[in-house]
Image (spheres, rainbow, N blue to C red):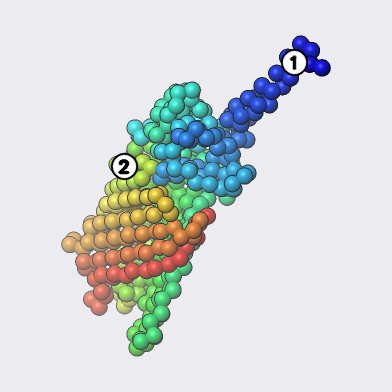
Amino acid sequence: MAPCGPARTLALFALIAFGVGSPLQAQFVSDPQKTDSLRLRNGDWVVGDLRDMARGIVTFKTDAMSTIYVKWPRVLTAATGKRFQIYLDDERRYLGSLQASETLGRVLVQADRDTFEVATQSVVELKRIKATFWNRLDGSLDFGFGFTQQNAKTDLSLRFETRYLFNRNRLNLLLDGTFSRQDSVSDITRGTARLMYIRELKGMWFLGFSAAAEQNSQLSLDIRGSIGGGPGRFFIANSRMELFTIVGIGYNRERFTGEEARNTLPLGLITDFQFFDWSGLSTDLSSRLSIQPVLNDAGRWRISFTADLTQEIVNLLYLRIGLVEEYDSSPPSADANKNDFRITTSLGWTY
C-alpha cells in the first residue's frame, strides 16, 4: 500500500534533513570556540583545530587525520573563534578572530573594536594567543657530532632556542655551544646565551632589547656580558620572507685571556633575514649580520655574521647546516685571533 500524504511529507523532510542538512552542517559549526573550518580551493571543507599560520603554512589538527599542514594559498576562507595575533600584508595588525565570508577568496576579521572583510591571501600570519605560559612556548633543539680519524679531531655542538609570544610582545632565548678537540692542539670552546625582547609598535616599527653572554677561546675571549637596545623596523613580513633591522647602543663588559676586564660602548646595527619555502618538505634559510663600531675605542669594529639552512626530513625532525663568521678588528689581547670561522652540521627537533 502506498504511504498516505502526511507520511510521504514526513519522509521527504527526513530525507532533506539527513541527506542535505548534514553536509551543510559539516561546513560550519555552531560553536566556533571548539571547532575551526577551512574551505579549500577544491571545494572541500576541513574541520578541526586551527593552531597557527606562519610562512604560508597552516597547522591544523583534525580527529580523522591528526595534525595536517595546509598551504595557505589553497585556502579560500576560514572560520575560527580563537584569538590570534592577525598580521595583514599592508602592515596592519589586530588581535581577534576570523569568520568565513560569503564571498569566495575573502575572510572576515573580527577585531576587538571592529569587524571588516579582507582578501584571504592578505592575511600573512596568524599567531595563536594561548591561555597558559607553557602553551605559548615553541622552539627547537639540535645536536651535532663530527669525528676525523686522521688527526683524532672531535667536534660537538648543541643548540637550544625557544620563543614566547603574548599579544605584541616577543621573547627569544638562544643557547648555543660548540666544543672541538684535536691531538697536539688546545681544545676550542665557544658558548653564547642571548635573550632578546621585542615590543611591537604601530605599523612595522618595534623596540628591541637584548642581554647576552659570550665565550670564545678561538678569539681568546674569556667572557663578554652585554646589554643594549633601540628601535627597529620590519621591511618585509609576509608568508615567505621576513627582514628587519635594529639600530641601538649597548654596554659591554669583556675580558680577554691575560688582560684586565674592560668596558666598551658599541653602537649596534643588526639586520635579520629569513626565507621559507614550503614546497614539499619545508626549507628555512635565516641569516643575521651585526656591525658594531666601538664608540670608546676608536678604530675598533666588531662584525658577526651567521647563516642557517634548515631542511625538514620528516615531521618535526630536521637537518641544519650553520655558518658563523666573527671578526674583531682590534682585540685588546695582542695574541688573540681577529676572526673565527666555522661550519656546523646538526640534527634537530622542533616543538
Label 1: how many residues lie within 10 Å, few (<14), some (14-19) or many (20+)? few
* Left or right of 248 on screen, residue 37: right
**Would you say residue 19 is visible in this rendering?**
yes
Amino acid on which the number 2 mark rests in the picture: Ile
Give the residue at the far left of this rendering: 299
Picture coordinates of residue 340, whole percent (x, y): 29, 70
Coordinates of residue 269 in the picture (x, y in percent): 27, 52
Kindly identify which residue carries mark 1.
8
Kindly identify which residue carries mark 2.
236
What residue do we see at 25% from left, 66% from top? Answer: 327
Tell which of 124 and 201 is nearer to you. Answer: 124
Q: Measuring 40% from the left and 34% from the top, which residue is drawn there?
A: 121
Picture quarter containing residue 187?
A: bottom left
Foreground residue among 152 and 341: 152
Quadrant in the picture for residue 82: top right
> In which quadrant is the N terminus drawn?
top right
Whole-percent x and y of residue 330?
21, 68
Q: Is residue 215 visible?
A: no
Residue contact at pointers 1 and 2, CB within 8 angstroms: no
